[in-house]
Image (cartoon, grey):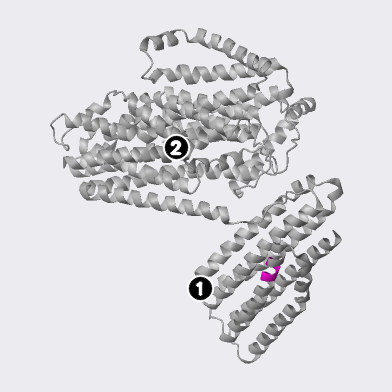
């Protein structure tokens, strides 16, 4: 039986490495989004600074490891074999849960995952012990679970959402009032003072508070620091303010960029110091448990784990190795670079493609906020309101072609980093495993709100996004609790069988997710959708639109053919797949329409005619997608309701229409791919031929209905298909005529 514990220990070590990789991939968003979103410094510099922060933070995280040993359950109430089952269940669940979210590109909270996994596994094993005793009841569960500490941790995590949002909003609002969006035009001393305050705050909370549980710092030095904290903070403020002034004056280094650099280091260090326990706390606790049991000479099911209730230092070497793995993951994990978009988009100062749809909650929140704002405006004098509004006037950015504007400016990036790192460090010093995901995300949302990034056109979408993300966090907690409990039950049922089976399952699922993610990325690189026009001239717009028309013709051809085949064969899965293809196409067209405002804004004064052409082209593309959507929806509904299959003559007629339309669409695709626009006239010449064919098929169906057709549903569907196909052809021909006319004018 001893061998099974050695196997479990080895497996936990391997899972710890995997969890570090998966965890950093998930949490990279926490310390990279502000620096990347502001575009203040290069990506390479950001990565180097973050790597140094992670390395230092890992070495200072020893005190947080106690959470895994005794933060959630009472170790003395469990025997060694039970503790190992809990730890094994937690790590298996954690790696699968985090990898699942990463594969979907959704950042989640590693802190919430580990806390509720420990809670779920411990509760299940406790209930098993209670039921086996015969004398204990459900109320005795409190003997096994550290309810006080667990409640403190859970409420701390939930409270952090409110605190992070509120503090972030307050600090950002005050900072913007003092600095405005034209902060670079302020006197040098203003920037130096801001830099001094920010750097001093970071120094105090990160370095001074962080020294508390750092194992490699001499105790005498710690005692000196804690005994002279006030003096050190005062001197620190003077030194940092002087450094900012020196860098600004003699090296012309932007103070705000400097703050972002040290802020990125600070939050990466705070992340590693607080979150490392999420990845290796359980395996280290298992190793220390095994060491204590192996020298005891007592049977595994008789050795009480009272020893884990005491303070046990974590070996510095293990922390160092963990830090190295985290740094390597940061540099080489593709998933680590794929989890930034949600947070940056929701906090963006400019309009972006909104990723979330509004709901009744988001609409209610926005209406309430607008009502409060209206009431506030009635109380505040107009002169004061005008002064405040001036501080929030955004400068117009002049961008090169293809260049993207920063999601937010350097002031907001600095506040995000400063506030988040300070809040995380406070929690770390109190040995509370605060969720860095919750804190960084909610600070970013609070500063966005205060910075008026959520305007009337985006607020309902942004609030919906925040509510969706928060809802996902609660789902994480529930999933972690239930999944860990189930895994713990299975392992307890048969340790020797279930441990190898579950480990094999982990390997298979991780491999499958990796292959799936890789294939999706490869597909994403080759799947070319409709593109926004980047040109500011008529000629450029016409050329760029050619690619979109070619793309539209190709996809229309495939979707229409698939729909008719799915309908003919009563293939519901093919029809469902076609519906998804149309939804994607429609979303791309809608995105182009949403971009019309910005497209017109950047046009040359001599190229205004290009806007009329572009808008008309989009209108016809919209007509095409609407016709396809109607045809697909009616066909899917017909088959899904199990109505009679189409008659042979109907299928034959539809095949003839499909062949004719396919030839037409293939010709259009070739014309626009080869840029031989003179051949459009040949397409236009076929217009009447296609219409005549459709009219003939309509007449045939009228005759069949009068003589042999007995199904109203069949007749209705068939006429819908023919008439909507006629509208589809009309939209395509209008598109060709518009393009041909504009091409001839150039």
Can I make out residue 431 in this image?
no
Q: Is residue 23 toward the left or the right of residue 713 in the image?
A: left
Q: What is the x, y in percent for residue 692?
A: 74, 82
Tell me the number on the disc at residue 329: 2
Query: Whole-percent x and y of residue 457?
Result: 70, 44
The quarter holding residue 145 reads top left
Residue 632 makes an appearance in the image: yes
**Main secondary structure of the magenta stretch:** helix
Quadrant in the picture for residue 373: top right
Verify CB contact (< 8 Å) between mark 2 and mark 1. Answer: no
Give the magenta range: 665-669
Residue 370, image x and y in percent?
68, 39
> Which one is in front, 401 or 307?
401
Callout 1 secondary element:
loop
| Residue pictured at 52% horizontal, 43% vertical | 338
Q: Earlier in the sequence, mark 2 or mark 1?
A: 2
The residue that disc 1 covers is 571
| Position in image of residue 165 (x %, y %) | 56, 32
């Amino acid at each position: 039986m001893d061998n099974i514990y050695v196997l479990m220990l080895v497996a936990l070590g391997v899972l710890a490495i995997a969890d570090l990789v998966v965890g950093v991939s998930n949490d990279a968003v926490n310390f990279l989004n502000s620096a990347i979103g502001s575009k203040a410094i290069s990506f390479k510099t950001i990565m180097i600074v973050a790597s140094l922060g992670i390395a230092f933070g890992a070495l200072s995280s020893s005190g947080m490891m106690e959470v895994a040993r005794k933060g959630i359950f009472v170790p003395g109430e469990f025997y060694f074999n039970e503790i190992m089952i809990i730890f094994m269940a937690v790590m298996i669940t954690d790696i699968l849960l985090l990898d699942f979210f990463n594969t979907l590109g959704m950042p989640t909270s590693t802190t919430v995952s580990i806390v509720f996994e420990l809670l779920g596994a411990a509760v299940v094993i406790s209930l098993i012990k209670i039921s086996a005793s015969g004398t204990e009841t459900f109320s005795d569960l409190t003997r096994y679970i550290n309810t006080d500490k667990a409640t403190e941790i859970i409420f701390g995590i939930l409270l952090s959402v409110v605190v992070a949002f509120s503090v972030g909003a307050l600090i950002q609002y005050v900072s913007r009032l003092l600095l405005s969006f034209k902060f670079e035009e302020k006197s040098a001393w203003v920037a130096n003072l801001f830099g001094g305050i920010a750097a001093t705050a970071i120094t105090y909370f990160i370095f001074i508070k962080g020294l508390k549980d750092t194992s490699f710092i001499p105790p005498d030095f710690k005692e000196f620091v804690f005994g002279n904290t006030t003096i050190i903070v005062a001197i620190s403020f003077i030194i940092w303010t002087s450094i900012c002034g020196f860098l600004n004056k003699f090296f012309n280094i932007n103070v705000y960029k400097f703050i972002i650099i040290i802020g990125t280091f600070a939050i990466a260090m705070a992340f590693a110091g607080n979150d490392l326990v999420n990845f290796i706390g359980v395996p280290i606790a298992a190793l220390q448990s095994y060491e204590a049991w192996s020298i005891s000479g007592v049977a595994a099911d008789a050795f009480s784990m009272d020893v884990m209730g005491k303070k046990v230092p974590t070996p510095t070497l293990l922390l160092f190795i963990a830090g190295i793995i985290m740094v390597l993951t940061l540099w080489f994990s593709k998933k680590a670079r794929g989890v930034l978009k949600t947070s940056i988009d929701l906090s963006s100062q400019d309009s972006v493609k909104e990723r979330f749809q509004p709901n009744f909650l988001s609409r209610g929140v926005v209406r309430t906020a607008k009502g409060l704002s209206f009431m506030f405006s009635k109380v505040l004098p107009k002169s004061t309101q005008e002064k405040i509004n001036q501080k929030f006037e955004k400068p117009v950015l002049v961008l090169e072609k293809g260049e993207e504007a920063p999601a937010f400016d350097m002031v907001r990036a600095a506040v995000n980093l400063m506030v988040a790192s300070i809040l995380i460090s406070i929690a770390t010093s109190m040995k509370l495993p605060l969720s860095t995901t919750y804190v960084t995300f909610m600070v970013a949302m609070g500063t966005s709100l205060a910075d008026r990034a959520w305007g009337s056109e985006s607020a309902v979408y942004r609030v919906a996004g925040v509510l969706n993300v928060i809802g996902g966090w609660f789902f994480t907690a529930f999933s972690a609790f239930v999944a860990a409990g189930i895994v713990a039950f299975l392992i307890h049922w048969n340790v020797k069988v279930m441990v190898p089976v579950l480990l094999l399952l982990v390997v298979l699922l991780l491999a499958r997710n990796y292959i799936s993610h890789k294939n999706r990325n490869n597909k994403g690189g080759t799947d070319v959708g409709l593109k926004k026009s980047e040109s500011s001239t008529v000629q450029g717009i016409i050329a760029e639109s050619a690619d979109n028309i070619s793309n539209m013709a190709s996809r229309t051809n495939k979707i229409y053919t698939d729909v008719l085949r799915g309908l003919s064969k009563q293939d519901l899965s093919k029809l469902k797949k076609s519906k998804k293809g149309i939804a994607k196409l429609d979303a791309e067209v809608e995105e182009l329409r949403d971009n019309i405002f910005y497209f017109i804004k950047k046009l040359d004064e001599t190229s205004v005619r290009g806007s009329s052409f572009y808008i008309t082209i989009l209108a016809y593309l919209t007509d095409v997608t609407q016709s396809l959507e109607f045809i697909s929806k009616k066909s899917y509904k017909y088959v899904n309701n199990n109505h009679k299959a189409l008659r042979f003559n109907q299928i034959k007629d539809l095949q003839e229409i499909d062949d004719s339309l396919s030839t037409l669409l293939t010709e259009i695709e070739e014309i626009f791919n080869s840029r031989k626009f003179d051949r459009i006239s040949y397409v236009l010449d076929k217009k009447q031929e296609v219409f005549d064919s459709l009219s003939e098929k309509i007449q045939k169906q009228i005759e069949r209905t009068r003589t042999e057709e007995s199904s109203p549903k069949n007749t209705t569907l068939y006429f819908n298909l023919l008439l909507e196909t006629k509208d589809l052809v009309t939209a395509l021909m209008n598109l060709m005529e518009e393009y041909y006319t504009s091409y001839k004018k150039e």
